[in-house]
Amino acid sequence: MEKQSKIFVAGHRGMVGSSIVRKLKAEGYTNLVLRSSSELDLRDQAQVRNFFSAEKPEYVFLAAAKVGGILANNIYRADFLYENLMIESNVIHQSYVHKVKKLLFLGSSCIYPKLAPQPLEEKSLLSGYLEETNEPYAIAKIAGIKLCENYRRQYGCDFISAMPTNLYGPNDNYDLQTSHVIPALLRKFIEAKENNSKSVVVWGTGAPLREFMHVDDLAEACFFLMHHYSENEFVNVGTGKEISIKDLAVLIGKLVGYNGTVEFDTTKPDGTPRKLMNVNRILGLGWKPVISLEAGLKRVIEEKPLKTSI
Ligand code: GDP
């Protein structure tokens, strides 16, 4: 990838895409092709075909997706499956048709079977049943991996896939119904502090274990993989460290400066009990994350994501 190469970052307004754009700009890449979803509907085959014919990007970061937390995944099941399948099929196929030099597809750690051995190794893909709440999203992301693998096998396309762990950072979604746990808890604790509320409600039992990575670490990994990795196998991207939802709530409460109590709403789902990535493959390639959970959360809080006084 040269500094003048034409690079399409699909999903540049999202948390991942915007972080990749910041990284590319910081590295001096100037020829970025960016389209908002109102300018280019990636679910629409004709629009994507016309876009690729007109722009002919040389490199593609496929960070566009319909994403959401445990509740949204479970409620909008058809939308998560259909929209993600369409986006991936359209962008990956047109990248093949228009001879894109390299494409990086972004998936998710939820592609792994619910009961796969932990930490999750890349080889566990398709070795068992998926977690029920996010099965549609996972099926779509698995299809994306398989598209990349098979366009490489059949047509020799240099298409690679990275599977990030749970992410947080700038441009996250803070809507309590559709967000992931970190933005949800940041919002709940910040607002509870401002309103002097006695307690904060955390969904589930607090027992599930999750791994979290700041999105700027993921953007570094994507940049690294785009330069140094061209294999058929997809690559996990994570920190290799996990924390319980209860401890996460305590940590966020401490960082926000909240002094009340935490209640658990066990009518809400826990989701998968544990989701920790084995990151040996990417460590072996020579990349590692640098932002600790505490440092990353502090950074996000300092950015005042809710535009409040805290
Ligand atoms: P998941 O990793 O796919 O399960 O997605 P989430 O980030 O939405 O949820 C992770 C865990 O955090 C689950 O066990 C949730 O039940 C728990 N959790 C606790 N409080 C919240 C909350 O306010 N919002 C969300 N989304 N999850 C929460």
Image (tube, rainbow, N blue to C red):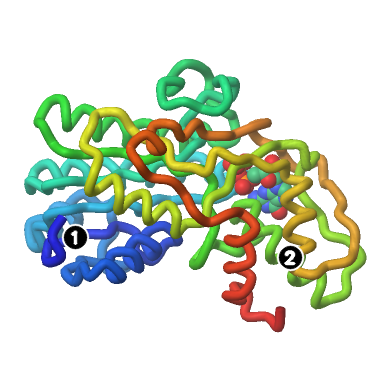
288 vs 235, nearest the viewer:
288
- Residue 202 is situated, as x and y percent measured from the top left of the image, at 78, 51
Give the residue at x 71% y 38%: 269
* Horizontal relation, residue 201 to residue 130: left or right: right
Give the residue at x 29% y 45%: 225
Does residue 144 appear in this view?
A: yes
The residue tagged 2 is: 255
Please identify the quarter of the rendering in which residue 85 is found. top left
> Closer to us: mark 2 or mark 1?
2
Give the residue at x 71% y 58%: 185
Dividing the image into 4 quarters, which one contains the C terminus?
A: bottom right
- Residue 12 is situated, as x and y percent measured from the top left of the image, at 34, 63
87 vs 183, nearest the viewer:
183
Decide if ligand 1 comes within 8 Å of the CB at mark 1: no
Label 2: element kind: helix
Q: CA distance from mark 2 to mark 1?
A: 38 Å
Amino acid type, mark 1: Ile
Q: Which mark is residue 7?
A: 1
Does residue 71 appear in this view?
A: no
Dividing the image into 4 quarters, which one contains the N terminus?
A: bottom left
* Horizontal relation, residue 173 to residue 145: left or right: right
Amino acid type, mark 2: Leu
- Residue 58 is situated, as x and y percent measured from the top left of the image, at 12, 54
